[in-house]
Image: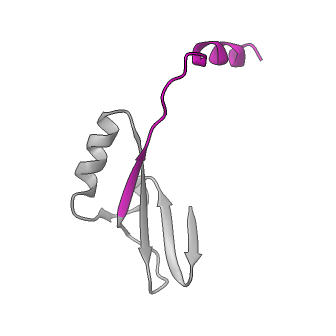
Amino acid sequence: MRATVDGTSVVVGRRLLFTQAGDGIDAWADAQAAQGRTVVFAGWRADGGAPSEANAALAVSDTIKPTARAAVEAFHHL
């Protein structure tokens, strides 16, 4: 996702959107991914240029619910 917020270019998405990442971000992201979490990277540039560095990252995950198997099976029968 790309946006301009108060004149600052912001990019949010996967690691491949950036040519580099800030100190420690890649190692942290790898550790999160190894635990099954999805990592989302963010970069911004105040001068309005396209961000090439991931300045931050966040990890998200969801707990598998007991009803998940039935939901997937029902989906396959659509």
Rendered residue at 44%/83% (across/down): 46
- Residue 10: give x, y in percent of width and height: 50, 71
Rendered residue at 31%/48% (across/down): 29
* Residue 50 shown left or right of residue 31 in the figure: right
- Residue 39: give x, y in percent of width and height: 40, 47
Q: Is residue 62 magenta?
A: yes
- Identify the magenta region: 56-78
77 versus 5 height, above or below: above
Quarter of the image with the N terminus is: bottom right
> 71 or 26, which is in the foreground?
71
> 28 or 78, which is in the foreground?
28
Q: Is residue 73 magenta?
A: yes
Rendered residue at 66%/18% (across/down): 71
How many marks the image carries: the answer is: 0
- Residue 49: give x, y in percent of width and height: 46, 81
* Residue 71 shown left or right of residue 22 in the figure: right
Quarter of the image with the C terminus is: top right
Q: Quadrant of residue 75?
A: top right
- Residue 23: give x, y in percent of width and height: 22, 63
Q: How is the structure coloured here?
A: one colour
* Residue 68 shown left or right of residue 45 in the figure: right
> 47 or 56, which is in the foreground?
56
For this orientation, the residue located farthest to the right is 78
72 versus 36 height, above or below: above
> 35 or 1, which is in the foreground?
35
